[in-house]
Amino acid sequence: MGARLFEDGFSVTLLDLTAPSEVREDVKALIALSQDGHDVCYRQVDVTNRARVDEVISEFEQDLFVVLANAGIVKSQPFLDISETYWNQHLDANLTGVFHTLQSAARIFVKNKRPGQIIITGSWVGRVPWPEIAAYSATKAAVEMLAKSAARELSGHNIRVNVIAPGIVNAGLAKHQLQTEPQYAARVAKVVPLKELQTAEQVADIASFLCSTSGDYFTGSTILADGGASLFQFD
Ligand SMILES: NC(=O)c1ccc[n+]([C@@H]2O[C@H](COP(=O)([O-])OP(=O)(O)OC[C@H]3O[C@@H](n4cnc5c(N)ncnc54)[C@H](O)[C@@H]3O)[C@@H](O)[C@H]2O)c1
């Protein structure tokens, strides 16, 4: 999504757990495209660390227009085997991390009396119980209500809050599961009516739309784009 918003003319700051010296090659390539006044930069941030989230969002407060809360984790675990540690890890990263990002950004927009937009990455499994990811699905359901609640309260400040709910993307977390969890890959093979996995670019297109003038009447919305995966399956 960062690359797409950079193409759209935004300067972009990427936040992630990874140390700056160890960022992925595609992130390095994106940073290398920076020009004066049209930049991509990177900051190491753990979104579960509120002080660090506040620090980095404040650093860019004069240029803040859009904030994407996209960090997330998932690991398959049968429901009966879920430990408290596993449960808390998912809630901390996928729900509390989103809350920190959302509230921190909203406070900056309000303080500076500026309009703003916050986009949260949810998932189609926030509404459909995919097997063995109960904790992940619960967090993705929760961020939809968090976004609606925040959208209602923040609308008076001209701040919009929306959720993008992708399907099964052939990148990131799902790609890792496809490569490492045979039972996950077997289920994926049957579940998408449009018969193709989603691309990261298709998800980025939705962020681009929300950030364009065409998206300016959306708030409290979840844009579900899942290739029909959440439709009832007949076989
Ligand atoms: N891949 C899919 O099929 C799919 C589908 C629906 C939703 N999503 C959501 O898309 C978002 C991006 O995931 P992705 O699939 O691109 O995977 P990804 O692994 O490429 O991206 C997730 C990123 O979150 C970072 N992260 C994890 N915990 C963090 C923390 N505490 N602080 C800061 N960064 C942290 C990771 O380091 C990683 O770079 C996630 O919210 C995920 O739930 C993915």
Image (cartoon, rainbow, N blue to C red):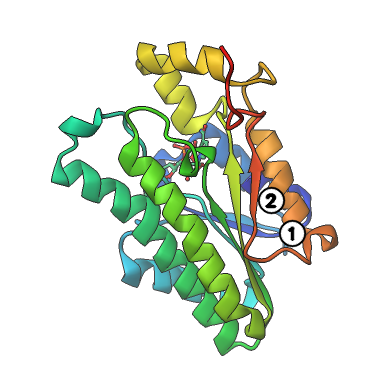
SS category of the residue bearing label 2: helix
Image point (84%, 63%), residue name? 213
Disc sitting over residue 207 in the figure? 2
Q: Quadrant of ligand 1?
A: top left
Label 2 environment density (alpha carbons within 10 Å; few <14, some 14–19, many ≥20): many
Confirm or deny contact between disc 2 and disc 1 (CB under 8 A). yes
Side of 152 relative to 37 (left or right):
left
Question: Residue 35 in the image: x percent, y percent?
Answer: 72, 55
Q: Is residue 111 above or below residue 219?
A: below
Of residue 219 and residue 235, the one placed in the foreground of this image is 235
Question: Residue 64 in the image: x percent, y percent?
Answer: 62, 72
Check disc 1 and give the amino acid type: Cys
* Rendered-image quadrant of the C terminus: top right
Disc sitting over residue 211 in the figure? 1
Image point (64%, 88%), residue name? 113
Label 1 environment density (alpha carbons within 10 Å; few <14, some 14–19, many ≥20): many
